[in-house]
Image (tube, rainbow, N blue to C red):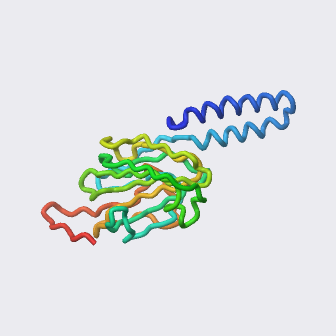
């Protein structure tokens, strides 16, 4: 179980167990219903162990889910161009968020907003969100932004990372409770090799979203796009 939902897990176990026991005493055949609901709620807070792939030039998925957007030349908050990769998390996905790369947290920005259905195109701009700006370890260019976006059911974003924290690639930093989106924005660069496509299912801290093509030592850098 995720450490970001200890209260929810404890309440689910206590209330679910009590309702299941009471139903089993009064109407045994129906006890399976609250038991299944309790297990389903507990599965939402699962936190499986993940072994990140090795490689300093990799950017990993920040969440489990389905890729719904891969956009080159998107506008970053600072006006620069970026590569934006958006992942939609359904209620069946693991909702723990993980750092897409090793690096230091430069900014942590909370933005209040609405709770529209995460499948709506305008949800990523209008909904409540929290953004981490990370200065990635070499050789990755930065900054790299990770944004947790609330959905119609997700009414609480948890982010434990703070400015100055050093994160390892694939390290847990928070979660979004119930359906939502997670966005990773990379600075536009000629040497990015995107490794995912729209419709693909990814795993946080494990699936490679993009890799930076590295060059032999002494080779001049290519100009950024």
Residue 80 higher or lower than 21, as above or below: below
47 over 85 or under it: above or below: above
Q: Is residue 126 left or right of residue 74?
A: right
Instruction: Identify the residue at image location x=30%, y=46%.
Output: 104
**Residue 95 percent across, percent down from the top left:** 53, 47
Q: Position of residue 129 (x, y in %)?
A: 48, 53
Quadrant the N terminus occupies: top right
User: Where does the image place residue 56, in percent across and percent down from the top left?
Assistant: 29, 52
Q: Which residue occupies 46% across, 50% down?
A: 204
Residue placed most toward the observer, 128 or 194: 128
Residue that appears at 52% across and 64% down: 68
Q: Nearer the viewer, residue 44 or 112?
A: 112
**Which residue is painted at 44% across and 62% down in the image?**
85
Taking the view exactly as shown, the residue that stands out farthest to the front is 112
Of the 4 image quadrants, the one containing the C terminus is bottom left
Furthest toward the left, the residue is: 218
Horizontal and vertical percent position of residue 111: 46, 52
Which residue is nearer to you in this view: 185 or 124? 124
90 with respect to 135 (left or right)? right
């Amino acid at each position: 179980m995720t450490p970001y939902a200890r209260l929810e897990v404890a309440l689910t176990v206590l209330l679910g167990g009590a309702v299941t026991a009471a139903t089993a005493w009064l109407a045994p055949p129906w006890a399976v219903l609250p038991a299944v609901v309790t297990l389903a709620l507990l599965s939402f807070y699962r936190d499986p162990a993940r072994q990140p792939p090795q490689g300093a030039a990799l950017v990993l998925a920040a969440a489990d889910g389905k890729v719904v957007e891969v956009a080159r030349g998107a506008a970053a908050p600072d006006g620069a161009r970026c590569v934006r990769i958006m992942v939609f998390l359904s209620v069946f996905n693991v909702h723990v968020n993980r750092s897409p790369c090793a690096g230091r947290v430069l900014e942590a920005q909370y933005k209040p907003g609405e709770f529209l259905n995460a499948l709506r195109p305008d949800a990523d701009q209008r909904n409540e969100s929290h953004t981490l700006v990370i200065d990635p370890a070499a050789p990755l260019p930065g900054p790299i932004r990770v944004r947790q976006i609330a959905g119609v059911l997700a009414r609480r974003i948890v982010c434990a990372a703070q400015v100055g924290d050093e994160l390892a690639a694939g390290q847990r930093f928070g979660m979004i409770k119930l359906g939502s989106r997670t966005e990773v924005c990379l600075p536009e660069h000629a040497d990015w090799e995107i490794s995912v496509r729209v419709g693909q299912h990814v795993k946080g801290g494990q699936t490679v979203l993009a890799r930076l093509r590295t060059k032999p030592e002494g080779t001049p850098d290519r100009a950024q796009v």
